[in-house]
Structures are given as structure tokens and as C-alpha cells.
Amino acid sequence: GAVVSQHPSWVICKSGTSVKIECRSLDFQATTMFWYRQFPKQSLMLMATSNEGSKATYEQGVEKDKFLINHASLTLSTLTVTSAHPEDSSFYICSVRAPYGGTEAFFGQGTRLTVV
Amino acid sequence: KQEVTQIPAALSVPEGENLVLNCSFTDSAIYNLQWFRQDPGKGLTSLLLIQSSQREQTSGRLNASLDKSSGRSTLYIAASQPGDSATYLCAREGGSEKLVFGKGTKLTVNP
């Protein structure tokens, strides 16, 4: 069964609006979740590390004020794309790691964002 | 810069053929390497995880090997089936829990 649930699976929004994407860890509590982005024919690139109860850690080149991350509970992290523009159109996907020292990474279904 | 390269970028084979997908990485200080499958517009499904102390892992018709000294991993698929058609991604972890992905190999298995 699914370990990670991501919602919505796709969304179309108007330029200038904000979009929230949810990532839920279903099988275990996750103090850390990861947000990746994938442009067409490109690799998945890590955007930020979401930490429960503290600020997210952003990768170089990722605007923290544009991509707001909230890790409100041990099973939920949200990514909000603020003031979205067409260049933000991409596939966003979250990941959690197996607990108790586990190294396997599990991914959500991904969210296809299209900004028009 | 950590880089992961996957060759070939695309592969088309007839059903039943055995095939090998290649993954190379520039940093030999690897913590683990994981292979994933991605169907069009979908998320990633974990296939095999090889920890740095291991040389290979097997699951059904899949076998993945890891050679840290040469910076290479291979994914072997035996007796390929049309249902194996997907993009296969490899990702390395250097110990920070962050995964660095290759661009993937798009596999098409023709009936």
C-alpha cells in the first residue's frame, strides 16, 4: 500500500495566485520530509528539506519566500507556491525516509502544477 | 558537484529480452544507491536499495549491483515484459539523506 500520499495530483492555476500541495506520511511519523521538483526531461532536483517543528532548509537557488513549507505535524508537510508564474509549472513530489535508521526513500504520487 | 549519469537515455527492446541499465556517479563517498521506477505523470516506486556495504540486491526479475570503486551501478532486468515499460531512475545518497538523481532511462518493451 501507499506509504506517502500527496494531494492534489494535478492543479491548474492562474498566474499570480498561490497553490498549496499536501504531503502525508501514512505508515509512520516523519520528522523530516523532502520536496523535489522535476522539469520535463530533467532529473528530480531537491528543493528543500521540511523539518517538523522548525524551519525548512532550502537548497541553493530555491526562493524560500516563494516556496513556503510548513511541517505542522509528524505526518503532514505542505508546500505553498506563492504568486505562481508559468515558469513554476513543474512536477512537484515529496519524499519520506523509512524510520528507525531506515535508508529507503518513499515518494508520493507527485503533483503536476500548470500555471496559466 | 555531485552528478549522476544514466546511460542510455532511452532503450527499446522486444519482449523477453534481458537488459542492463547503467548508472554512474562522480562521488565515490556513497551512503546508498536506490533504483526507482516512474510511470508517465506518476510518482516514484522504489525498486531496489543497495547500501554502501552491499554489492548487489535482487528482487524478482530485477538485480542491481553497486561498484563504489568505479562509481557505477547497474540494474539488470531479466525476461523483460511490456509492463516493465517506464522510466528508471537511479539516485545516490551521500549521507545527508538527500538524494541526487540521474535523468533516467526510458524503457520501452515491445510485445
Image (cartoon, rainbow, N blue to C red):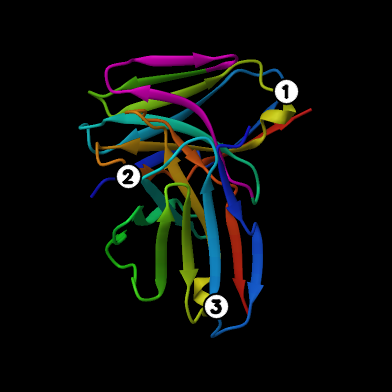
Magenta region, mostly helix, strand or loop?
Answer: strand
Query: Does the image show residue A112?
Result: yes
Along the line of sight, the residue nearer the viewer: A4 or B39: A4
Q: Nearer the viewer, mark 2 or mark 3?
A: 2
If you read the primary sequence from the N terminus, does the residue marked by circle 2 or circle 1 appear first?
A: 1
Farthest residue to the bottom: give it: A16
Residue at mark 1 to residue at mark 3: CA–CA distance: 40 Å
Q: Is residue A14 left or right of residue B110?
A: left
Residue at mark 2 to residue at mark 3: CA–CA distance: 27 Å
Q: Secondary structure at mark 1?
A: loop
Chain at tag 2: B
Identify the residue position indicated by label 1 in the image: B15
Residue span colored magenta: B42-62
The crowd level at tag 2 (other Cα within 10 Å; few <14, some 14-19, many 20+) is some
Amino acid bearing label 2: Lys
- Residue A79 placement (x, y as % from top left): 47, 63
Dot 2 and dot 1 residues touching (CB under 8 Å): no
User: Can you say whether B32 is above or below B4 in the image?
Assistant: above
| Residue at 41% from the left image edge and 62% from the top image edge | A70
Amino acid bearing label 3: Pro
The crowd level at tag 3 (other Cα within 10 Å; few <14, some 14-19, many 20+) is some
- Residue B75 placement (x, y as % from top left): 48, 24
Q: Which image quadrant for residue B55?
A: top left
Q: Secondary structure at mark 2?
A: loop
Identify the residue position indicated by label 2 in the image: B98
Residue A57 in magenta stretch: no
- Residue B23 placement (x, y as % from top left): 40, 33
